[in-house]
Amino acid sequence: MALKLEDKLVVGISSRALFDLETENHIYETKGLDAYAQYQLEHENDILLPGTAFPLVKALHRLNADGHYLTEIIIMSKNSADTSLRIFNSIQHYGLEISRAALVGGAAITPYLRAFKTDLFLSANELDVQEAINANIAAGIICSHDGLPISPEDNIEQIRIAFDGDAVIFSDEAERIYQESGLEAFTKHEQENANNPLPEGPFAKLLKILSVIQGAFSKEEAPIRTALVTARNAPSHERVIRTLRAWNIRIDEAFFLGGIEKSEILKAFNANIFFDDQRIHTDPASKLVPSARVPYKK
């Protein structure tokens, strides 16, 4: 019987998000595909260092512990099969439970995200992530982890995922009003629409899936903990709370910061990944916790 993915949390991850391939990517960008392929073949048995998304992938393995099979992690790479052995050697070295891959040899990845029923796609390639967002698939551009220590030996007891609100969980409707008309117009609009749920954003479906998984466990034993970390504050917080209530979504922690820097809050939350739509938040956050930027839909 064929494996069904519809009832799993399916995470597609690029090789550059999972491992540190910045040297290799520089070779590709400056010397071309042939030089990159030759380098990978020559270093086929050299184990890659963990990349930004490595802690999240390791944490997601906990969802398949104790007889559960709740998630499927799939390598989604523009590598060819011939240049991919180094990636799989590294996966095996670290004991990661990844056995499936889409190696598309330079072709577009988005059609395969749909085919694999992907709920979340993480990549260092901005074009690939933009195309995924345009196709209504939750996706994030993994930030460089310079200065952020990532140890493959770290044991993660609970998956911790932090989300921005507008343009991530929710649509960018309110964000556009703020950008075009300012804070006063934004606050007025949100007060007037406090009882109207916000439209869904690119990560709404993912948050709902996570909430379903959480609901299968007691609060004390839940393998996932989520946080909303937003620049909103009172009185614009009310519409957010009512929206999550209308969606029947569980958020474990919520921070309405009103312009306070997000980084220290994310560090205190100990996020395995943080999703935000703005560089002014992801750049400083990425120095403390793994982070990914969510581009606007085009």
Image (cartoon, grey):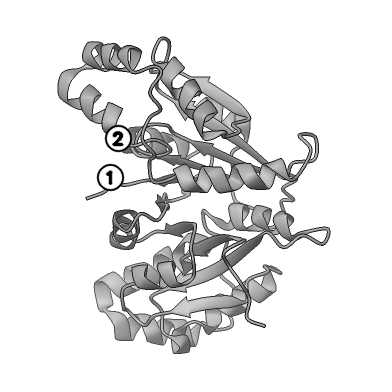
Q: Residue at x 57, y 48 (%)?
A: 209
Q: Residue at x 41, y 79 (%)?
A: 79
Quadrant in the rendering for residue 37: bottom left
- Percent of width and height locating residue 263: 49, 29
Q: Amino acid at mark 2?
A: Asp
Q: Which residue is mark 1?
A: 296
Residue extending farthest to the left is 180
- Percent of width and height locating residue 111: 36, 71
Question: As displayed, is residue 50 above or below residue 253?
Answer: below
Residue extending farthest to the bottom is 82
State if disc 1 and disc 2 touch (CB < 8 Å). yes
Q: Amino acid at mark 1?
A: Tyr
- Percent of width and height locating residue 46: 57, 78
Quadrant in the rendering for residue 217: top right
Q: CA distance from mark 2 to mark 1?
A: 8 Å
Q: Which residue is mark 2?
A: 172
Give whichever of discs 2 and 1 has the lower sequence position: 2
Q: Secondary structure at mark 1?
A: loop
